[in-house]
Image (tube, rainbow, N blue to C red):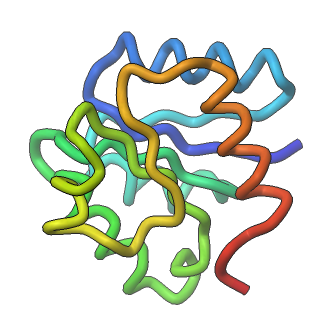
Amino acid sequence: MQTVLVVDDEFGVAEVLQSILEDEGYRVATAINGKQALARLNEVTPDLIMLDYMMPIMDGTQTLSAIRSNATFARLPIIMMSSLEEVSVRETCTDYDFFLRKPFRAMAVLKAVQQLLEHPPRK
């Protein structure tokens, strides 16, 4: 069973993503900010991370940078999520593998997750 770490400070978004992914057979771990996500990486070894761009304490850009600088996790596929347009996100953050704009459809989430897990971009 593949594991997805969902990092989002909006409880409702994390809960919906968890439900969608678990219904498809994925194991899901959650974190409410980047600092908690980095701690969770020591407890859970995800196959993919879904990361919110705007969060308190440690935002998506800082979290992504910390993940990519850790050799153990540097190659994990990461989906960046935001209600902002991707062009705005790319001004400060570029090292993710896929972008999902909020609000998103369940099928778009599943398609992105399946695609990245089947064909990881960082080998």
Q: Is residue 26 left or right of residue 70?
A: right
Q: Is residue 23 above or below residue 114?
A: above
What residue appears at the point 37 percent right and 10 percent down from the top-left corner? Answer: 12
- Quadrant, the N terminus: top right
Q: In which quadrant of the rendered view does residue 45 lie?
A: bottom right
Q: How many marks?
A: 0
Answer left or right for 117 relative to 33. right
Q: Quadrant location of residue 91?
A: bottom left
Extreme-left residue of the structure: 57
Image x and y of residue 121, in percent:
67, 75
Q: Position of residue 108 (x, y in %)?
A: 62, 30
The answer to whether residue 83 is left or right of residue 41 is left
Percent position of residue 88, x then y: 16, 54
Q: Residue at x 73, y 86 (%)?
A: 123
Residue at horizontal 52 percent and vertical 65 percent from the top: 97
> 31 and 16: which one is in front?
16
Front residue of this view, candidates 109 and 37 = 109
Task: Please give the name of the residue rendered at 73% of the width and 38% of the height, measured from the top-left corner.
Answer: 111
Q: x, y percentage for residue 51? A: 40, 47
Taking depth in this image into account, of 28 and 39 the one nearest to the observer is 28
Q: Is residue 113 above or below residue 103?
A: below
